[in-house]
Amino acid sequence: MGELKQFKLPDVGEGLTEADIIKWHVRPGDTVEVNQTILEIETAKAVVELPCPFEGTVTELLVNEGTTVDVGVPIITVDVGGEAVPADVTANTVTTPPPAGAQEPGMAGSIAPKVDPTAPQQQKRVPVLVGYGVKPGSTTRRPRRSSSPSPTPAPAPAPPSPNGGARVAVLAKPPVRKLAKDLGVDLATITGTGPQGSITRDDIHQAASAPTPLAPAPVRRAGEREERIPIRGVRKHTAAAMVQSAFTAPHVTEWLQVDVTETMAAAKRLRDLPDFEGVKVSPLVLVAKALLIAARRHPMINASWDEQAQEIVVKHYVNLGIAAATERGLIVPKIKEAQDLSLPDLARALAELAATARAGRSTPQDLSDGTMTITNVGVFGVDAGTPILTPGESAILAFGQVRDMPWVHEGEIKIRKVTTLALSFDHRIVDGELGSAVLRDLGAMLEDPMRMLAWS
């Protein structure tokens, strides 16, 4: 008697209703362990790795890569061999003898018994892997347009192992798996040199240092004039958020050109201080510090509009968002409780935030609960722009490129380092006087960084 468990797509703790299946890390026939990463999903905010909630042998992948799946839909079937399953796991249990002619449970290509869709289902909230999912039947979605009916997802074939046989489970200790993840190495592509063919740290480092073959350039068919890209994941979320913000909060943007020659010199001097050893110090660190000080002097700039309660929520903490362009699109990870950080700690937090975002490892928690945002458009060679507010925030600052420009300094025209600041704010909360005061304070502190010391 085989005991099959169906693992349902969980709510990963952010009010998730659906997610895209990005990459499976297992195939039918693979042996999985509890908490082993089995796939990557892309939600509206981030790419999330899902661990397996039980151990056993994969019998079927129920959804294909690239598919959008609702929370609560079964995504994989695992033969647990009759072993106990943790109580906090969302799964359907199906115990049945293997059908005639089918392979034994645990063999690659085994087919999971199908659950009778006409059987009555108990309508109640069920626990999921992380947090709680939506109530059964409560999620509604607009039918997707398709030129042809979508076929039922078929289990992907197990790729052959290097020796030409069936693919076997990868043998690697948890620290080795973490190292491979951090270095972006696919364990399935490595032949282990350790005991019983296990993968060692040396194997990972050797694979990471090997030259990466160039991917072939996409071939466009003759006469093809258009390309259609599915709107999913981060891009879908960003588009919805921008539309919501643009047509909900009345935006006002003010501009200010600033002589930041002293700020550039200060950033250079900071790099030589022991407290900043090993930390990348850029002018953005001082811009962020100036904004935190301005928020402390003018608390209403760090507020939000609660339409339902008809209240303005003034926040005496700053979760500072830094807009980051990644391969998956624009994301805004946050530095939580940024107002409590010293300048060296703020510099480290900015460096870690950027590295995590570029590596695609920002979590939903990293991307939530922001109060103010900085977008550094200067890195793209742009002087300034009209930034759109992040929903739920009342201010966003655009920091433009720093350029050599003629400037009147101490009564003479000299070449100075000049940038443009653009501050967009929610005019329901921030009037022109307050917005101008904040922008003026920012400019004064960046013209003379010593002013920051008076407020630190």
Image: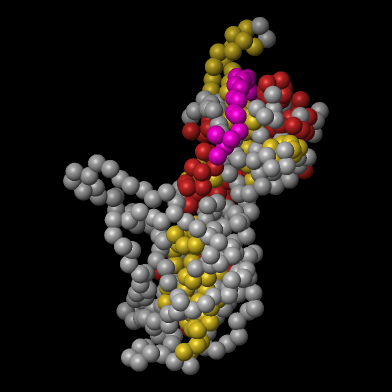
273 displayed left or right of 210? right
Image point (48%, 93%), residue name = 1
As drawn, 175 above or below 293:
below
Q: Quadrant of the C terminus?
A: top right
Determine the residue positioned at 59% across, 28% down. 251
Residue reaching furthest right?
454
Give the image location of residue 57, x and y in percent.
48, 82
Identified at 48% across, 52% down, the residue is 233
Q: Magenta includes 254?
A: yes
Residue furthest out toward the top: 411
In this orientation, does residue 318 appear?
no
Could you tell me how many numbered marks the image carries?
0
Type of colouring: secondary structure
Magenta extent? 244-270
Q: Nearer the viewer, residue 322 or 97?
A: 97
Residue drawn where x is 41% and y is 90% of the image: 98
